[in-house]
């Protein structure tokens, strides 16, 4: 059975590969809106939300908005009924603007700047059902200093990490959460000052089926902690645990040979490992990548083809400023050659597969999307689609080398909408000009 036929209960594909996208439509979008260009399909975002809620029907599913905070995506996710997990005042602000009510907002504080805490406590005054997830006793003290006495979830470092790269394994990293052996005591102390409603842990990001054992171990430890808090052995007061949040990290298959995560199997393993939950407590999960990754592609145009020793370098107009993951994590993103713009060049399918290094315009050696990978021999003017770019793609884009950030299009059925316009050279200096630090006249050249 082909992957496209292996549809799940909701009738959707387990993954949308870069080869599954409508090539003509992507070519038209690039022609109309120029490159580099992000394209995010809201229909696929909704499907991914439904696949998660189907697999975890009894759990609270909270979208980790850091994966993609665009308004159109947030609204699409909200409409499917998922909650929002926010890592900063900025993310919380975006989630509120997208219409998430307080009882569907979860703010996770990681060494939070004072300005963030001030903002969150201010929001909580109006939205008392919001929950603040806290990973250090200092953060609890700082909340109390601001008069906060509302809902708190205790983030625990379970000592178990997992993920696609050392830099995204949080579970064992001392930076995150209260160490497991101190968590029960910290939660009980917190219950004197706050309404402690849950426990939380996040192992890391990009967990695949081979790392299920770590996931199971983390979940089991969290279940144990929740039971200890809800029904303490000694004379400690019981805590009314509403939920056990085991974080996100559900991986997606970036490489063509990777198989999609068996989500129902992960759900089953999670339910088994956490059981028995304290009475009235639910399981909660926080997927980010899984919701948006395969709903997005980055389109980029080939501007240079250069033989260099044994290598063939294909220069493109997107780089690590548009998609940082390959440079930062050596992450693999699939690349498909969509061919030229009405030129006489042969269709990509008729070209030989040729090993190429696809490199961006940034003056950094690490600014490459792939090395010596076989693509349908790229030519100047070709359009390339970089796949599975919807999570942590636009979100980690930046203006290094004074590169304006790309535009983004949201697809919804047959409609396509510019949801983030392309930045201009003027955007690069806005904050300097507003500070009065840059008063010089500009060239009259189109910017
Ligand atoms: N919950 C918490 C507390 C998190 O810190 C994260 C991700 C998530 C949920 C969602 O994880 P996901 O389901 O998306 O794997 N920039 C990196 C990923 C960093 C993730 C950080 N925390 C990347 O591009 O791979």
Image (cartoon, grey):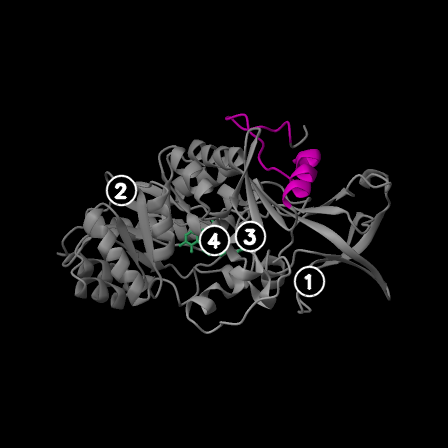
- Which badge, 3 or 1, is on the more N-terminal residue? 1
Residue 201 as seen in the image, left or right of residue 278: right
Q: Mark 4, mark 2: which one is toward the viewer? A: 2
Helix, strand or loop at label 1? It is loop
Q: Mark 1, mark 2: which one is toward the viewer? A: 1
Confirm whether residue 275 shows in the render.
Answer: no
Circles 3 and 1, Cβ within 8 Å, touching? The answer is no
Mark 4: few/some/many CA within 10 Å (<14, 14-19, 20+): some
What residue would you read off at disc 2?
103
**Real-space Cα separation, disc 4 to disc 2, in angstroms:** 30 Å
- Which badge, 1 or 2, is on the more N-terminal residue? 2
Circles 1 and 2, Cβ within 8 Å, touching? The answer is no
Circles 1 and 4, Cβ within 8 Å, touching? The answer is no
**Real-space Cα separation, disc 4 to disc 3, in angstroms:** 27 Å
- Which badge, 4 or 3, is on the more N-terminal residue? 4
The structure residue drawn at horizontal position 64% and vertical position 60%, both measured from the top left corner, is 445
Give residue 219's mark.
Answer: none
**Real-space Cα separation, disc 1 to disc 4, in angstroms:** 39 Å
Image coordinates for residue 220, horizontal then vertical, percent? 38, 49
What residue would you read off at disc 4?
214
**Nearest the camera: 37 or 323?**
37
**Nearest the camera: 12 or 30?**
30
What residue would you read off at disc 1?
361
């Amino acid at each position: 059975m082909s992957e496209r036929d292996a549809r799940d209960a909701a009738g959707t594909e387990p993954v949308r590969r870069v080869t599954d996208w409508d090539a003509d439509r992507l070519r038209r979008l690039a022609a109309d809106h120029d490159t580099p260009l992000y394209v995010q399909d809201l229909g696929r975002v909704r499907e991914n939300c439904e696949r998660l809620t189907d697999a975890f029907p009894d759990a609270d599913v909270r979208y980790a908005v850091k994966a993609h905070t665009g308004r159109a995506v947030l609204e699409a996710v909200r409409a499917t009924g998922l909650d929002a997990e926010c890592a900063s005042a900025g993310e919380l602000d975006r989630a509120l603007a997208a219409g998430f009510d307080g009882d569907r907002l979860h703010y996770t504080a990681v060494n939070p700047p004072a300005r963030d805490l001030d903002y969150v406590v201010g929001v909580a005054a109006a939205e008392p059902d919001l929950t603040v997830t806290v990973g250090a006793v200092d953060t609890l003290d700082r909340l109390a200093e601001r008069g906060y006495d509302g809902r708190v979830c205790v983030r625990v470092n379970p000592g178990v990490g997992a993920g696609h790269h050392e830099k995204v394994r949080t579970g064992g990293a001392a930076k995150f959460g209260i160490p497991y052996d101190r968590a029960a005591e910290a939660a009980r102390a917190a219950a004197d000052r706050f309404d402690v409603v849950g426990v939380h842990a996040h192992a890391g990001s990009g967990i695949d089926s081979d790392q299920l054992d770590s996931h199971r171990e983390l979940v089991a430890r969290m279940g144990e902690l929740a039971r200890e808090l809800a029904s303490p052995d000694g004379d400690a007061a019981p805590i009314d645990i509403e939920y056990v949040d085991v974080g996100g990290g559900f991986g997606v298959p970036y490489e063509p040979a990777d198989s999609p995560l068996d989500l129902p199997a992960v759900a089953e393993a999670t339910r088994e490992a956490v059981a028995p939950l304290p009475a009235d407590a639910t399981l909660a999960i926080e997927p980010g990548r899984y919701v948006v990754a395969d709903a997005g592609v980055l389109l980029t145009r080939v501007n240079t083809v250069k033989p260099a020793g044994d290598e063939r370098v294909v220069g493109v107009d997107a780089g690590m400023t548009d998609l940082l993951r390959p440079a930062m994590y050596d992450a693999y993103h699939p690349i498909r050659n969509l061919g030229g713009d009405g030129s006489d060049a042969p269709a990509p399918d008729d070209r030989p597969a040729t090993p190429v290094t696809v490199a961006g315009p940034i003056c950094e050696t690490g600014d490459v999307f792939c090395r010596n990978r076989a693509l349908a021999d790229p030519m100047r003017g070709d359009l390339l689609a970089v796949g599975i770019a919807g999570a942590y793609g636009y979100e980690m884009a930046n203006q290094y080398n004074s590169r304006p950030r790309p535009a983004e299009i949201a697809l919804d059925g047959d409609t396509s909408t510019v949801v983030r316009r392309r930045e201009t050279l003027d955007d690069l200096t806005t904050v300097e000009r507003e500070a009065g630090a840059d008063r010089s006249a500009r060239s009259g050249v189109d910017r």
